[in-house]
Amino acid sequence: MSAGDRKLTEFPYSEPGYGRTVAVVGVGSAGCRISNQLSKESRLFEHFVYVTCDDHDIANVSRGEKVLIDAKATGKNTPFNVRGLLHSRLPEIRRHLADSQIVFMIAGLGGTVGSGLAPIIAKEAKQRNAIVVSILVMPYNFEKPKHYFAGLALKQMRRFSSGVILIDNDELLRNQMPAIDVSALVNQKIALALNKLLGSADQHEFSVGLNNVVDFVKTSSYSVLCLGESGKECRQAVIDAVNHFDNTVDKREAMKSIVHLCSDKSITMGEVVRSIGGLSGVLGRGDMQVEYGLSANSSAVTTAIIMATGFSSTKYDNYDPVDLAMRSFTSNLDPDPDAISHVPLLLSDLEA
Ligand SMILES: Nc1nc2c(ncn2[C@@H]2O[C@H](COP(=O)(O)OP(=O)(O)O)[C@@H](O)[C@H]2O)c(=O)[nH]1
Ligand SMILES: [Mg+2]
């Protein structure tokens, strides 16, 4: 029996985790760092694959397969440049993923490595009939030059994934954080959220679990992950998390959500019910389905992790010039010829 088939009453697990049937693939700097953080926190994920062009990204990785692609000769200034370098390494990546039925792809979009390579690896995994769940970190608002590649890569990732979960860097950022610590803290939050949702196996907690999360995100609509915090009150943490959705999607479109609350042992069932009960009044159109998990073993701040799905569009749709051009093409009788002339050029190398 695989860990994903176990019931919640069988927690905590005493057996090993998913082995090679579930792979976590980190691509590029953000993808490798977040995956590495997850590998430290999770006891269930045992198969990690790291793909990058920068040896710093994997210097601290202690377990997993590392695929380091040498981009010194060609430079790695666009996703298209690095893409060409991946082909000779594809057999190695295929071998690493040969036994994996579920592949979690983790990448930050907008740079060169994650944006360039993650779509090809996702495509490879999908062609082998694996379920591909892509967890994509979107660039900060201020990183305007990265939005173009992020939008383009997002569109490709949607095509080659069974489901995508979007995380907005801006929404995880606490403005008061010292700049030097920001990435590590943001990565810790992302790893915590994934670990709790997918099935952490510690005492005093239960999770929605990997199978349910995978079923949840297997949709053509977007899933979005947001976190909220509060000094103590769970309800406040839930409201904080819900507020973060506003900047990215139309909250009313949420059809289903998974909430995981992390609090200390003093949390009462009444508090859980109050916190989660009010959710469908502020997210979705009043009839949103909610599943929940709980960790009553945290001593730090109270955290609400909310993943919602059902969104037909996000603010990132406007990051992709191809999409914008196509939309103006179909909605305008007289489309801007400059806007559409580069459409085939942008997509051609991946289509090939
Ligand atoms: N959460 C998080 N985001 C990051 C980190 N590093 C970079 N990013 C974001 O991810 C996007 C891609 O950057 P990066 O992963 O460095 O690019 P790549 O290595 O070329 O794939 C950037 O636009 C950043 O917003 C990180 O450590 N954590
Ligand atoms: Mg990098």
Image (tube, grey):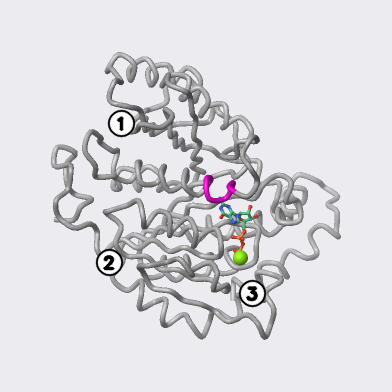
Q: Amino acid at mark 3?
A: Asp
Q: Residue at x 27, y 63 (%)?
A: 21
Which numbered disc, 2 or 1, marks the residue closer to the eye? 1
Q: Residue at x 70, y 50 (%)?
A: 319
Q: Amino acid at mark 2?
A: Arg
Mark closest to the chain's N terminus, 3 or 2:
2
| Residue at numbered disc 2 | 20
> Tag 1, which secondary structure?
strand
- CA–CA distance in space, label 1 to label 3: 45 Å
Which mark identifies residue 294? 1
Mark closest to the chain's N terminus, 1 or 3:
1
Tell whether 258 sits left or right of 31.
left
Which segment is the magenta one? 181-186
Q: Main secondary structure of the magenta part?
A: helix
Answer yes or no: do the residues labelled 1 and 3 have beta carbons within 8 Å? no
> Tag 3, which secondary structure?
helix
The foreground one among 210 and 200 is 200
Count neighbours of disc 2 (C-alpha within 10 A) and say few if under 14, some if 14 to 19, many if 20 or more. some
> Tag 2, which secondary structure?
helix
Answer yes or no: do the residues labelled 2 and 1 have beta carbons within 8 Å? no
Q: Give residue 162's position: percent from left, percent from top.
A: 43, 55
Which mark identifies residue 349? 3
Which mark identifies residue 65? none
Is residue 156 a member of the stretch shown in magenta?
Answer: no
- CA–CA distance in space, label 2 to label 1: 27 Å
Which numbered disc, 1 or 3, marks the residue closer to the eye? 1
